[in-house]
Amino acid sequence: MYDLDIHNFKQINPPHRLLMGPGPINADPRVLRAMSTQLVGQYDPAMTHYMNEVMQLYRGLFQTENRWTMLVDGTSRAGIEAILVSSIQPGDRVLVPVFGRFGQLLCEIARRCRAEVHTIEVPWGQVFDPQHIEDAIVKVRPKLLLTVQGDTSTTMLQPLQELGEICRRHDVLLYTDATASFGGNELKVDEWKIDAVSAGLQKCLAGPSGSSPITLNDRFEEVIRRRKCVEEGIRTDAHVQGDDEFIYSNYFDLGMIMDYWGPERLNHHTEATTMLFGARECARIILQEGLTETIARHELHGNALLAGIQHMGLNTFGDLEHRMNNVLGVEIPENIHGEEVRQMLLNDFSIEIGTSFGPLQGKIWRIGTMGYNARKDCVLQTLTALEAVLNKLGFSTKQGEAMQAAWNVYASAMKGENS
Ligand SMILES: *Cc1c(COP(=O)(O)O)cnc(C)c1O
């Protein structure tokens, strides 16, 4: 193994793809440029200035005044894990409304934190009525309600507007995983009274995976600060005795991460400089376009894709009233092999669309229109290619109708703008 021939290893030069799945998607070139800039030291005034700017920019995206709005280094699940590990003590009751795969992930992580996990469920393709959740809260009396805003596995968007009020009434902390929906769908952290939120860059934010923006309010900070910090635990050997107050992760100890991002700048990890540059650019681009405008753009291109798919004679998956703007579930027609279609799209058109997991495996494709790829040309190219492939494989469509339907959506949006 050690006498490998280095000449066999070419410079990295990945194929050019149009990524129209549920994420990751193509990064905005401006994000890639920000990420190719030179490094600075972690306490260089330029770096700490950028860290403070990142906090400000993400307050804008999360629509919050929360002081603790920062990045957790790692993919989106690093943000999820930091929030759960830092807030859940062994034996705490948590309630998880599960409507897809990412709700199951929250259960799994909460179990690792040795929480007493309670779930309620709806069939995949649906979301919860707030009353259903409140009834379960009354019954379970959890410390935390763990929710997913947009579950990419089912393409559904759980309405969160009323949950904050419900949680305050019952003295429950509300967390949501907004990775899939953030930047492409409305999320008003303060107005909706959500105590903690985590996200990622690789969906509507047009960046690569590897950084998780999070925000925590005072209520949530208090729960974390009440727990023992690692230093104390190590001094008292509390961790050896299995003290329940103790946060068992160093990397994900949000108390320490806050002290690193705060004015004390206590050394913890070395902030992932290049990811921070990327995350900063993702947020800057959206706020420059306007958050409202960015969400409207996701809605427009999601609607155009939907119209095209419906006029191709394909059925969509789930409750369309509650779908995310940025990803659509499409039923694979009878006698068509879903993977063969994906292969042809990739090999002949260099377009990637998504497959599915669990109960939906082999039943639906998931097509995303998000971030840098929430664009007219991406939608029209994907519809054209999909129609061509389906016809080649024996599913005949009235050719051209899908395109016309999508064009009509764009035309009426233009009219609306001009009136
Ligand atoms: C895509 C997605 C993630 C991704 O997590 P990673 O750790 O970045 O792979 C997490 N949560 C939800 C709801 C998602 O849709």
Image (cartoon, helix red, strand yellow):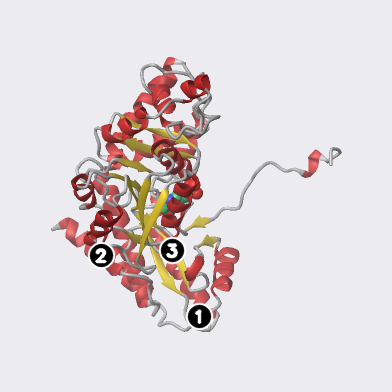
* Spot occupied by residue 216 in the image (x, y as percentages of width and height): 32, 35
Q: Which residue is mark 3?
A: 367
Label 1 element class = helix
Q: Which residue is mark 1?
A: 391
The residue shown at (42%, 41%) is 84
Sequence order check: which comes first, mark 1 or mark 2? 1
The residue shown at (54%, 79%) is 392
Work out how far the residue at label 2 is from the one at label 3, CA to CA, in angstroms.
22 Å
Q: Are marks 1 and 3 in contact (CB under 8 Å)?
A: no
Q: Which residue is mark 2?
A: 411
Decide: is 410 above or below 88: below
Figure quadrant of the C terminus:
bottom left
* Spot occupied by residue 227 in the image (x, y as percentages of width and height): 39, 30
Sequence order check: which comes first, mark 2 or mark 3? 3
Front in this rendered view, residue 33 or 231: 231
Count neighbours of disc 2 (C-alpha within 10 A) and say few if under 14, some if 14 to 19, many if 20 or more: few
